[in-house]
Image (cartoon, rainbow, N blue to C red):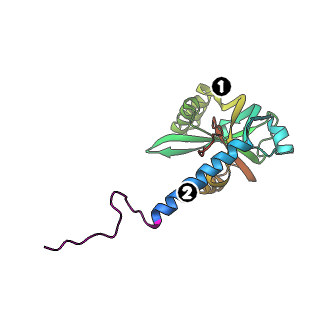
Amino acid sequence: MKTKHSSRRNGFISFGCLGYLLILGLIIGGAQGTYTALKNRNRVEITVSDYLAQKPDAEWVMFKNATLNLLDAAHMERFGKIDEVFVPVQDGETEEGAPVHILMSTKDKEIIAAMADLKAAGNSEEKVLAAAMRNASKLFMKRDVSGLIQFGIESNSKTREKLEKLDMHLAKDFVILEEGAQPALGQSA
């Protein structure tokens, strides 16, 4: 009886080209995470007005005393439930209809619950007013918000494209702040 010997090494799984692409992706992702962590050792604390006047060369930021405009927010759904909310971050003096330069991506349960309540109101003026009254304290929240500004491979171009198609008055150079994210060596945010 003849047996055929495989030319593959025993005990090792060969992924071919896919394996090399996977390794390259892990290296690039880890490299960007490491770059972000080394570049952003300290969080930059700044007001929205100061940020818009002179954008700092930093990705890890805290916007002091920012106004979160829930009325102009957008959301993403997964399996029919709101999963993530994109809230315009403004200073307290932003005029209505002004371009939005900063969107905060959040998975905060209170903000998601308020968005779900507003969404459930539908188009009925009476129901929308009732939902707005229930969530009055969340419609224009003033608070400090911090996180990482998405860039490079961290920035999801499909999400950006979908947001740009909405009537949110987004500035051409708008940024997305991933709430609560912090730089970490060797990993992407």
Residue carrying label 1: 137
Q: Nearer the viewer, residue 71 or 44?
A: 44
Q: Nearer the viewer, residue 134 or 10?
A: 10
Q: Position of residue 91 (x, y in %)?
A: 79, 35
The amino acid on which the numbered mark 2 sits, given as a three-letter code, is Gly
Instruction: Please identify the quadrant where the C terminus is shown.
Output: top right
Element on which disc 2 rests: helix
Element on which disc 1 rests: helix
Residue 176 visible in rendering: no
Highlighted range, magenta:
1-17
Q: Position of residue 179 (x, y in %)?
A: 64, 37
Farthest residue in the left direction? 1
The amino acid on which the numbered mark 1 sits, given as a three-letter code, is Ser
Asked if residue 97 is positioned above or below residue 16 in the image, the reply reads: above
Q: Position of residue 20 (x, y in %)?
A: 50, 62
Q: Position of residue 143 (x, y in %)?
A: 72, 28
